[in-house]
Image (cartoon, helix red, strand yellow):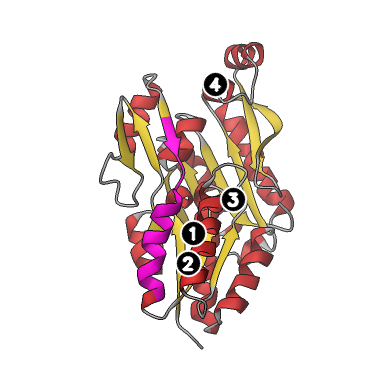
Amino acid sequence: MRDYIIMTDSGGSLNQAEVSELGVTVIPLSFTIEGKTYLDTPDHAGMDPETFFEKIKAGAQCQTSAVNVKQYVDAMRPVLREGKDILCICFSSALSATYNSACVAADELREEFPEAKIIVIDSLGACRGMGMLIYRTVMERRRTNADIETLAKFVYEQRDKQGHWFFVDDLNHLKRGGRLNAVTAIAGKILGIRPVMHCDAEGKLTPVSKARGSKGALRAIFEKMEETGDDIENQKTIFICHAACPDYVEYISELITEKYGITDIRADYICPVVGAHTGWGTLGLFFVANER
């Protein structure tokens, strides 16, 4: 059995400690804010998350860019030259062109390395929901010593069994992105309405319901975990992402710990390429579910 690596992109919002723990290769997306472009790396070398979300909250405009084909070719070629295969798990194709770039790069390199296996998978997820899928994939590999095809099958099976639930505080970002019209955004802000959203089976971020106030929205996504979670009491690890709102993280973590006794709750910042579109005050909850 040929050795292989697991490759992904920064859309999964894994931090540097997690990347080192998991031993995965992360290809960065990029973002441009205040006229300067930064790579979205796990170590936040270009801009730390606190500074990024302070700028977003203050009204700074941010544009994001997918991983391009050249980035993938440059990252994959040295691995293939070492005689290793590649399992590449990408940011949802419904939200980014990154998956398509990886597919094009893989097709190009298969001609150069016909003996190699390059498996590219659309995670159909975003942010730390995708990060959780990467985490679970690495844990499965370590547990079973699976070959690349067997592990790819695991990814395909499990990507449809993860809950991806979000709520958004700043409705203006959804308005700019075309997910809410101006009247709804203004009314929602006045009335304290928060949209509850999830990443659906096609990998799209979709509004599902509404809640009044931030705590109401947090309880709503916790209730979605209660409704759709698979054997929650025996889930060892839950992932959370947030956009500079640690008090929200503390509140929902307490709900989870008090009811289910889960203590390994891995919370970290939403990556800039997602945070640019959701804005400050967003929180996402990710868990193993019976359905998306």
Compared with 191, 21 (above or below) is below
Magenta span includes 241: no
Q: Is residue 146 visible?
A: yes
Mark 2, residue position:
109
Q: Amino acid at mark 3?
A: Gly
Q: Secondary structure at mark 3?
A: loop
- Nearer the observer: mark 2 or 3; the answer is 2
Q: Secondary structure at mark 2?
A: helix
Q: Measure how far apart labels 3 and 1 are at the Cα level.
A: 21 Å
Mark 3, residue position:
125
Q: Quadrant of residue 214?
A: top right
Mark 4, residue position:
176
Q: Earlier in the sequence, mark 4 or mark 2?
A: 2
Q: Measure how far apart labels 3 and 4 are at the Cα level.
A: 22 Å
Compared across the picture, whether 292 is left or right of 85 comes to right
Q: Earlier in the sequence, mark 1 or mark 4?
A: 1
CA neighbours of label 2 inside 10 A, class few (<14), some (14 to 19), many (20+) = some
Extent of the magenta region = 63-80
CA neighbours of label 1 inside 10 A, class few (<14), some (14 to 19), many (20+) = many
- Pointer 1 and pointer 4: residues touching (CB < 8 Å)? no
Q: Position of residue 292 (x, y in %)?
A: 71, 51
- Pointer 2 and pointer 1: residues touching (CB < 8 Å)? yes
Q: Position of residue 9 (x, y in %)?
A: 45, 54
- Nearer the observer: mark 1 or 4; the answer is 1
Residue placed farthest to the bottom in the image? 1
**Considering depth in this image, is 63 or 285 the residue closer to the camera?**
63
Q: Is residue 13 visible?
A: no
Q: Measure how far apart labels 2 and 1 are at the Cα level.
A: 6 Å
Q: Amino acid at mark 4?
A: Arg
Q: Amino acid at mark 1?
A: Ala
Q: Residue at x 59, y 61 (%)?
A: 121
Q: Measure how far apart labels 2 and 3 are at the Cα level.
A: 25 Å
